Amino acid sequence: MRESKVTVKIPRPLYRKIQQVVEGSGFNSPTDFVVYVLRDLMGEAEVTQASEFNQDELDDIKRKLKNLGYL
Protein backbone atom coordinates (compact mmCIF):
# COMPACT_ATOMS: atom_id res chain seq x y z
CA MET A 1 0.00 0.00 0.00
CA ARG A 2 1.38 3.37 -1.00
CA GLU A 3 1.50 6.03 1.69
CA SER A 4 -0.15 9.38 1.09
CA LYS A 5 1.95 12.51 0.85
CA VAL A 6 1.68 15.97 2.36
CA THR A 7 2.87 19.36 1.21
CA VAL A 8 5.64 21.15 3.10
CA LYS A 9 6.13 24.81 2.34
CA ILE A 10 9.64 26.23 2.15
CA PRO A 11 10.85 29.68 1.10
CA ARG A 12 11.15 30.07 -2.67
CA PRO A 13 14.82 31.19 -2.52
CA LEU A 14 15.67 27.97 -0.68
CA TYR A 15 13.76 25.97 -3.28
CA ARG A 16 15.77 27.64 -6.05
CA LYS A 17 19.02 26.75 -4.27
CA ILE A 18 17.86 23.14 -4.00
CA GLN A 19 17.03 23.15 -7.72
CA GLN A 20 20.61 24.22 -8.46
CA VAL A 21 22.00 21.45 -6.25
CA VAL A 22 19.74 18.88 -7.92
CA GLU A 23 20.84 19.71 -11.48
CA GLY A 24 23.31 17.04 -12.53
CA SER A 25 23.33 15.41 -9.10
CA GLY A 26 21.40 12.24 -9.85
CA PHE A 27 18.29 13.33 -7.98
CA ASN A 28 15.18 13.46 -10.13
CA SER A 29 13.66 16.48 -8.43
CA PRO A 30 14.03 18.90 -5.53
CA THR A 31 11.45 16.79 -3.69
CA ASP A 32 13.60 13.67 -4.01
CA PHE A 33 16.58 15.59 -2.64
CA VAL A 34 14.64 17.02 0.31
CA VAL A 35 13.22 13.59 1.20
CA TYR A 36 16.73 12.11 1.07
CA VAL A 37 18.16 14.81 3.36
CA LEU A 38 15.28 14.56 5.84
CA ARG A 39 15.51 10.77 6.00
CA ASP A 40 19.24 11.08 6.64
CA LEU A 41 18.67 13.59 9.44
CA MET A 42 15.90 11.50 10.97
CA GLY A 43 18.06 8.39 10.85
CA GLU A 44 20.77 10.18 12.77
CA ALA A 45 18.23 11.53 15.26
CA GLU A 46 16.87 8.03 15.92
CA VAL A 47 20.34 6.75 16.72
CA THR A 48 20.97 9.53 19.24
CA GLN A 49 17.43 9.75 20.59
CA ALA A 50 18.21 7.64 23.65
CA SER A 51 20.92 10.02 24.83
CA GLU A 52 21.60 13.72 24.82
CA PHE A 53 23.51 15.21 21.93
CA ASN A 54 27.19 15.81 22.41
CA GLN A 55 28.80 18.99 21.11
CA ASP A 56 30.02 17.41 17.86
CA GLU A 57 26.52 16.14 17.08
CA LEU A 58 25.00 19.54 17.81
CA ASP A 59 27.56 21.23 15.56
CA ASP A 60 26.80 18.73 12.78
CA ILE A 61 23.04 19.33 13.05
CA LYS A 62 23.52 23.10 13.07
CA ARG A 63 25.74 22.85 9.98
CA LYS A 64 23.13 20.78 8.13
CA LEU A 65 20.31 23.16 9.10
CA LYS A 66 22.41 26.12 7.97
CA ASN A 67 23.09 24.41 4.63
CA LEU A 68 19.35 23.90 4.24
CA GLY A 69 18.75 27.60 4.89
CA TYR A 70 17.09 27.30 8.30
CA LEU A 71 19.84 29.03 10.30
Image (spheres, rainbow, N blue to C red):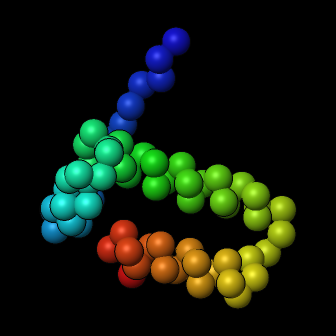
Q: Is residue 58 above or below residue 51?
A: below
Judge from the rendering whether residue 18 lies leftward or rightward of residue 47; answer left or right.
left
State the residue in front, 9 or 19.
Answer: 19
Please tell me which residue is depicted at 40% across the width and 78% down the height of the picture: 66
Instruction: Using the rendered image of the protein, determine whether residue 46 is visible from the camera's viewpoint.
Output: yes
Q: Which residue is farthest right?
A: 50
Residue 28 in picture, x, y percent from top left:
27, 39
Residue 42 in picture, x, y percent from top left:
60, 54
| Number of numbered discs visible in the structure rendering | 0
Q: Is residue 41 above or below residue 65?
A: above
Q: Quadrant of residue 21?
A: bottom left
Q: Which residue is farthest top?
A: 1
Please tell me which residue is depicted at 32% across the width and 74% down the height of the picture: 69
Q: Is residue 39 above or below residue 12?
A: above
- Indicate the quadrant containing the C terminus: top left, top right, bottom left or bottom right: bottom left
Judge from the rendering whether residue 41 lies leftward or rightward of residue 20; answer left or right.
right
Residue 39 in picture, x, y percent from top left:
54, 49
Please tell me which residue is depicted at 25% across the width and 43% down the height of the picture: 29
State the residue in front, 38 or 27.
Answer: 27
Residue 3 in picture, x, y percent from top left:
47, 23
Instruction: Using the rendered image of the protein, determine whether residue 15 is visible from the camera's viewpoint.
Output: no
Q: Which residue is farthest bottom?
A: 55
Judge from the rendering whether residue 42 lies leftward or rightward of residue 33; answer left or right.
right
Please tell me which residue is depicted at 52% across the width and 12% down the height of the picture: 1
Q: Quadrant of residue 70?
A: bottom left
